[in-house]
Amino acid sequence: MPISGMTGFGRADGALGAWSWAVEARSVNGRNLEVRFRGPPGFEGLERAAREGAQGRFQRGNLTVGVTAKRSEGAGSVRINLEQLERYVAAGDGLVADGRVERGRLDGLLALRGVIEVEDAGLDPDAQAGLEAAMAAAIGAALDGLAAGRALEGRQLLVVLSGQVARIGELSAQARAAAAGQPAAIKARFETRLKELAGEAASEERIVQEAAAMAVKADVTEELDRLGGHVEAARGLLAADVAVGRRLDFLTQEFMREANTLCSKSQTGALTTLGLDLKATIEQFREQVQNVE
């Protein structure tokens, strides 16, 4: 199974009896798995279905699961609140008697707030359980859609990350070739500087000794060896069938540590340029890794 991303969206709709609903599940990057749920009143048990469904499918990411539900208008009984209607009529009698307004028509009076009341008979326990089970199934379908979206992002990320790892490997090989010329460059620079200060009194033996000591301090063989090992480790993680985002994030830190040391030890412009290119590529890799589950 290829790596998975952490950004995606899934939706599922459903209906049962007088009820219809829609479920939307979406996620963005996150260090851990966090699930937020929003559901209709009276269906608090759906939150557990959402959390357990998310935990069974994902390991990281900030998830939001929302359920909206409505009952058809004919599902409840309707009655006219005569007391409220009488109060409205009585309140307007004085204005009607003064000729300031006309007596209200029935359609207008019925439209006043509180005159028409819809009585919800509610659901019996069996009907409630069946409805929640159907909604929970829709939550699962929406989460499956979200997982498919995250898998698609993962396939796209895999292409980008593989290319960046390959580039890091290429730059590391070029840096190794450039580093082979550091001892000669150090010797030439030290010899020139020493002769400027000491003139002809500067001995070849001293030049060689001092240049050799400087070359040891500037040796980047260990850094390049570790970079090579990190490249192979990254390739292995990208081919794994488990969530590798955390390990890739840690590996990115190791990449950058070696690149920084390489730059600090560089004694030639060519090696410094390669080190800076390495750091830029590693930073691009780090940004993409933040999207990996």
Image: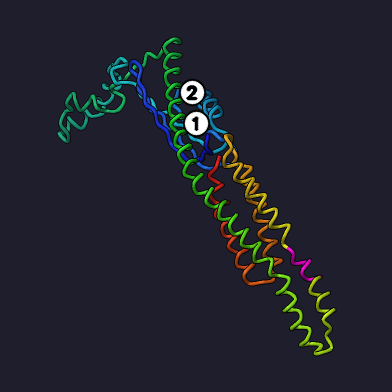
Mark 2 and mark 1 in contact (Cβ < 8 Å)? yes
The amino acid type of the residue labelled 2 equals Leu
Frontmost residue, 78 versus 44: 44
Residue found at x 84% / y 79%: 205
- The disc label shown at residue 46, or none: 2
Q: Which residues are magenta?
A: 213-219
**Residue 122 in picture, x, y percent from top left:** 40, 14
Q: Is residue 156 left or right of residue 78?
A: right
Q: Quadrant of the C terminus?
A: top right
Q: Earlier in the sequence, mark 1 or mark 2?
A: 1
Q: Is residue 202 above or below residue 49?
A: below
SS at mark 2 in the image: helix
Frontmost residue, 46 versus 88: 46
SS at mark 1 in the image: strand
Residue found at x 78% / y 83%: 194
Frontmost residue, 224 versus 75: 224
> What secondary structure prevails in the magenta region?
helix
**Residue furthest out toward the bottom:** 199
Asked if residue 225 can be seen in this view, the reply is yes
Asked if residue 282 can be seen in this view, the reply is no
- The disc label shown at residue 227, or none: none
Residue found at x 17% / y 34%: 101
Residue holding disc 1: 37
Asked whether 279 falls inside the magenta stretch, the response is: no
* Separation (CA) of disc 1 from disc 2: 9 Å
Determine the image quadrant of residue 19.
top left
Residue found at x 70% / y 53%: 226
Determine the image quadrant of residue 258.
bottom right
